[in-house]
Amino acid sequence: MGGQLDIMFLPLMAHGHMIPALEMAKLFTSRGLKTTIISTPSFSSPVINAQAAGLDIGLVSIYFPPHDSDLPDHITSLDQVLSDDALIPKFFKALSLIQHPVEDLLRQLNPNCLISDMFLPWTADSAAKFGIPRLVFHGTSYFSLCAAEELRRHKPFRGTDHFVLPNLPHRVEMATTEVADFDLNEDADGFSKWMREMREADGRSYGVVVNSFYELEPDYADHYRNALGRRAWNIGPLLLYNNSADGGGGERGKKPSIDVAACVAWLDSKKANSVVYVCFGSMAKFSSAQLKEIANGLDAAGHDFVWVVREGGDEEWVKGMRGLIIRGWAPQVVILDHPAVGGFVTHCGWNSTLEGVCSGVPMATWPLFAEQFYNEKLVTEVLRIGVSVGNKKWRRAGHQGVGGEAVAKAVRAVMEGESAAEMRRRAAEYREMARKAVGEGGSSYNDITDLIQQLTAYGL
Ligand code: UDP
């Protein structure tokens, strides 16, 4: 049978998941496939912008939170519940309640494949019900997938506060305080149990698509497939499938809170590699004491900076600062790609980390929660394109405890001297490799060709 493969995407309601889902749709559309994203009203506008710019990506909407959930109506995304222990289980319950509307869509639209966010384990059953393959999207690095899996299998943290991550191709040490509570104890709470269900659902899936490229972490791409036995395709960096026509650069996820041209003009007035960009993704919540320490650190480091402050930020001391402060949402990729930007203070969310890699900037790493501590180790110890700010404490919200001096020291380390220059040289090499990987004949390009062939053999 012939025909056009039809792929449906079901992302999680969070910017770090919605952004790469749209990029995946762009990628598969560019390879001649039909794509449809299942979204909720509050996350639909980037898809609508892409459609308005002429991209042939379908959009179907489901309501979230669903009417029969006990989440308040204003809770529409994951970042709104992370600091509230009572809301987290309600959020996951609500995620399970969208199974029916999603299955109605699968019945109606009859796609050949479902690419589901890892946070929606029941999609393994839905895909089986309709006889289509389910691919899982974790939205993280091979390194973190391998590290977390080896850690859960061997539990090297038992009875110690420091350990070496077992069985990995490199010797990487970790403090027990850096490990996520759901990896330390798989039955700790509702969230941990949900994580376990997700892993079980992975086992019932056709395979995994990874937003990474082979040359970035070859040992871990191999380890994941060969030692851990997973079927995986590396298809990234997904951000490189954006083009400026649909706002993919300036308006990723949300409309920026600053005029992009004004931001670029500010950067244009600075020397090459003289500005440090500071941003902690879409979910981090710092105490105000910690914000003050960041401010002190940036001040002491003495470099120009762009700092994205999501909460607080209206205090007098912020108003007196000399850098460019963005309150709300920054055009992150535009900023990182600007030649004036020479360093990135990042929380190591995987999207941000890859954006740093693709811009060739050294990173001062400040992981906070999720799988960010693993990504930090990849950046600082395997790729050696960053230095740690020194946070050793995994916590979901209320981040605190890093002093201004540590911030200043890490900023200087990525901005000044021979070792910063060396990191920048290495980062520039990865930047080039990333572009080659997605170009025709590159490693990600070829993996995508292979995936499309296998899906075609399965479904058409
Ligand atoms: N982002 C952005 N502007 C901001 C904050 C974040 O464009 O002010 C984007 C960022 O470029 C990245 C995503 O939001 O693509 C955040 O994803 P990541 O995995 O880095 O972190 P998370 O938000 O999931 O913790």
Image: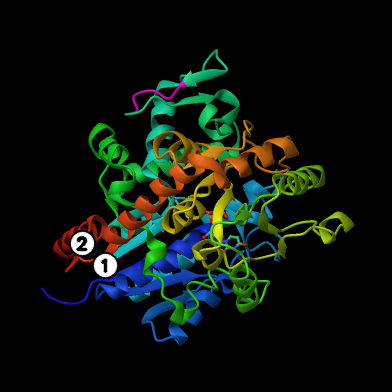
Q: Relative to 48, is 372 above or below?
A: above
| Whether residue 188 can be seen here | yes
Badges 1 and 2: C-beta atoms under 8 Å apart? yes
Quadrant assignment for the N terminus: bottom left
Asked if the stretch drawn in magenta spans residue 71, the answer is no
Q: Amino acid at mark 2?
A: Leu
| Whether residue 13 can be seen here | no
Q: Quadrant of residue 68?
A: bottom right
Q: Which residue is mark 1?
A: 112
Q: Relative to 454, is 381 above or below?
A: above
Asked if the stretch drawn in magenta spans residue 165, the answer is yes
Specify the principal SS of the magenta part: loop
Which label sits on residue 455?
Answer: 2
In x, y percent, where is residue 85? 70, 43
Count of numbered labels shown in the rendering: 2
Give me the residue at 41% from left, 21% from top: 154
Give me the residue at 40% from left, 58% from top: 116
Give me the residue at 17% from left, 65% from top: 456
Q: Which residues are magenta?
A: 164-168
Quadrant assignment for the C terminus: bottom left
Q: Relative to 248, is 379 above or below?
A: above
Colouring rule applied to residues: rainbow
In x, y percent, where is residue 60? 46, 76
Q: Residue furthest right?
A: 316
SS for tag 2? helix
Give me the residue at 58% from left, 63% from top: 271
N-terminal of the two: label 1 or label 2?
1
As measured in the structure, the alpha-carbon distance from the residue carrying label 1 to the one carrying label 2 is 8 Å
